[in-house]
Amino acid sequence: MKILSLMGDQFQLIRDVHSKKLPLSALHDISADSFERDEDGRSPLHHAASLKDHEIVAFFLSNGHSPATKDDEGWTSLHIAASQKDIGTSKLLLATSSADQPALVGFVNIQSSSGMTALHYACSKQSIELVSLLLNASADPKIKNNLGQNPAHRAAAVGNLDIIKMLHSTCPSSIKETDSEGSSVLEIANENGHHDLAAYLENMINH
């Protein structure tokens, strides 16, 4: 696949359709089998996700573009959607991956080059709705990133009790894990000044 700058014709088309300068049908020539990538390895679907354009995302998915496609940092479009707290795009991507497509089994748990899953980002961004959506789509709370942190570590760092409760309900052992430096979820909460959350975690761990 050809690597080109953001000024490439396909990406200009996407921007023009997004801004309503051109109709959606202008994207028909961007094939799922021969699309271009930008200098960061991002595909047309990545760009549609970054624009939060649900119509274009749906168009590419319906025309065979894979939600599992990664950029140079290992990000899928779902990583982008999660990092932007974009529920609409996330729903579209997960609906496609839940269809009868064996190649997309485990899509929700794809890790980036830094080991991050979409669930890690949803927890960091404190999106309760997105965390719920991902967990219902079989996101794994036990997966650790390159720092040895699971999603509960990320939720503890930002002090989100509701998300910690959701993760604990789905996977009780996730709140007991330590990262690569030996820091527990409880310790991460305390280190970031979230003492009420730390008290909750201590109570749950001891019962």
Image (tube, rainbow, N blue to C red):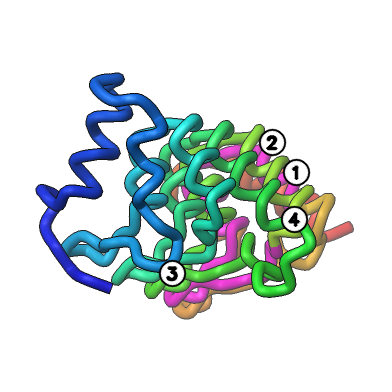
Residue 72 rendering spot, x and y as whole percentages: 29, 71
Residue type at the position of mark 1: Lys
Q: CA distance from mark 2 to mark 3?
A: 25 Å
Q: Does 139 sit above or below residue 198?
A: below
- Callout 2 touching callout 1 (CB < 8 Å): yes
Task: Say which element carries label 4.
Answer: loop
Q: Is residue 21 above or below residue 55?
A: above
Q: Residue at x 62, y 56 (%)?
A: 152
Give, as a single range, the part of the protein colored magenta: 140-167
Which of pointers 2 and 3 indicates the residue nearer the eye? 3
Task: Answer left or right for 174 relative to 191.
Answer: right
Identify residue for label 2: 162
Say which mark, if any, is on residue 112. 3
Distance in Å between CA atoms under marks 4 and 1: 26 Å
Eye-nearest disc, 4 or 3: 4
Residue highlighted by disc 1:
165
The residue depicted at 39 percent of the width and 70 percent of the height is: 74
- Amino acid type at circle 3 is Ser
Residue 198: give x, y in percent of width and height: 63, 48
- Asked if marks 2 and 3 touch (Cβ < 8 Å), the reply is no
Disc with the residue nearer the chain's start (1 vs 3)? 3
Q: Label 4 amino acid?
A: Ser
Closer to the chain start, of discs 4 and 3, is 4
Q: Nearer the viewer, residue 14 or 50?
A: 14
